[in-house]
Image (cartoon, rainbow, N blue to C red):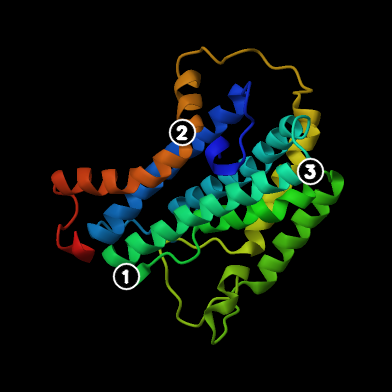
Amino acid sequence: MPENMAGGAGGDRYWEVDGVRGTAILMMIAFHVAYDLDHFGGARLAVDRGFWWALARLTAFLFLLLVGVSLTLSYARASSRLSPGALRQKYVRRGLTLFFWGLLVTAVTWMVVPEGVIVFGVLHFIGVAVILAYPLLRCHRANLVLAIACMAVGAGLEGVTTDTPLLLWLGIPPEGFYTFDYFPLFPWFGVVCLGLFVGTMLYPRGRRVFALPDWSRVHGVRELAYLGRHSLAIYLLHQPVLVALLWMAGAIDPGFYGF
């Protein structure tokens, strides 16, 4: 995610980070077009398995990996000008801001599509992850160990349910739980930790340590990087826009889920 979603680099940006993020945005939009057609238009595209399922998981993996990478870039540059207390406040404030946006998504989906209301989706998760990741920003290889551990715990919790919603955020949903978007701490915090590890390896102290041509002005790459710099706004707005366009095209039922 960019600065407004995960702590962003600030100052000079790395076009390759923004470009990969922009690619993930296009993947997200493609999946949500299929998802909307499947759920609201009856297209029966089987988005819960096969190609579309794999695309959704790969998209989420890229986004959350880049959350970790962006946090390391942000920390490397902010730590030279902010006190430890100010740094901590910066990430707590940013995490709470993202969690608030997640609560707004919860409210909107509760009003529009209550059958699949989003109670701990990607924005809720990133908000929590930014706060939890702050103490880990000075770690290096330990983040790789933590990443593997979180993913292993997530795999172990697969299919486990409980009779309370209080453990939902950890990856233990209540039985029969259904939502349009769900990113529990396990295994997804492991992907963020993997991003922290990758960021410190590829961009130690916020500096790129590998050779790369400057493609920042190349047509196509420049546009992808632009999308990557504005991923929060795109994430918040793309679904209403997609639904409206598909509705106007007659591809979805305007009475489906209140539309």
Q: Are marks 2 and 3 in contact (CB under 8 Å)?
A: no
Give the CA distance from mark 2 to mark 1: 28 Å
Is 33 located above or below residue 187 in the figure?
A: above
Q: Could you tell me which quadrant the N terminus lies in?
A: top right
Q: Secondary structure at mark 3?
A: helix
Q: Where, by quadrant of the figure, is residue 257 drawn? A: bottom left
Is 233 left, or right, of 217 in this rendering?
Answer: left
Give the CA distance from mark 2 to mark 3: 28 Å
Q: Secondary structure at mark 1?
A: helix
Mark in front: 3 vs 1: 3
Mark 2, other Cα within 10 Å: few <14 / some 14–19 / many ≥20 = some
Q: Earlier in the sequence, mark 3 or mark 1?
A: 3
**Disc 1 residue type (three-letter):** Pro
In this rendered view, identify the residue nearer to me: 42 or 90: 90
Give the CA distance from mark 3 to mark 1: 42 Å
In this rendered view, identify the residue nearer to me: 21 or 135: 135
Please tell me the numbered disc located at residue 230.
Answer: 2
> Residue drawn 59% across and 43% down?
6
> Residue drawn 48% across and 19% down?
222
User: Residue 30: x and y, percent?
Assistant: 38, 42
Q: Are marks 2 and 1 in contact (CB under 8 Å)?
A: no
Mark 3, other Cα within 10 Å: few <14 / some 14–19 / many ≥20 = few
Residue that carries the numbered disc 1 in the rendered image: 114
**Disc 2 residue type (three-letter):** His
Q: Secondary structure at mark 2?
A: loop
Residue that carries the numbered disc 3 in the rendered image: 84
**Disc 3 residue type (three-letter):** Pro
Is 71 left, or right, of 6 in this rendering?
Answer: right
Please tell me the numbered disc located at residue 160.
Answer: none
Is 219 located above or below residue 89 in the figure?
A: above
Q: Earlier in the sequence, mark 2 or mark 1?
A: 1
Is 253 left, or right, of 153 in this rendering?
Answer: left
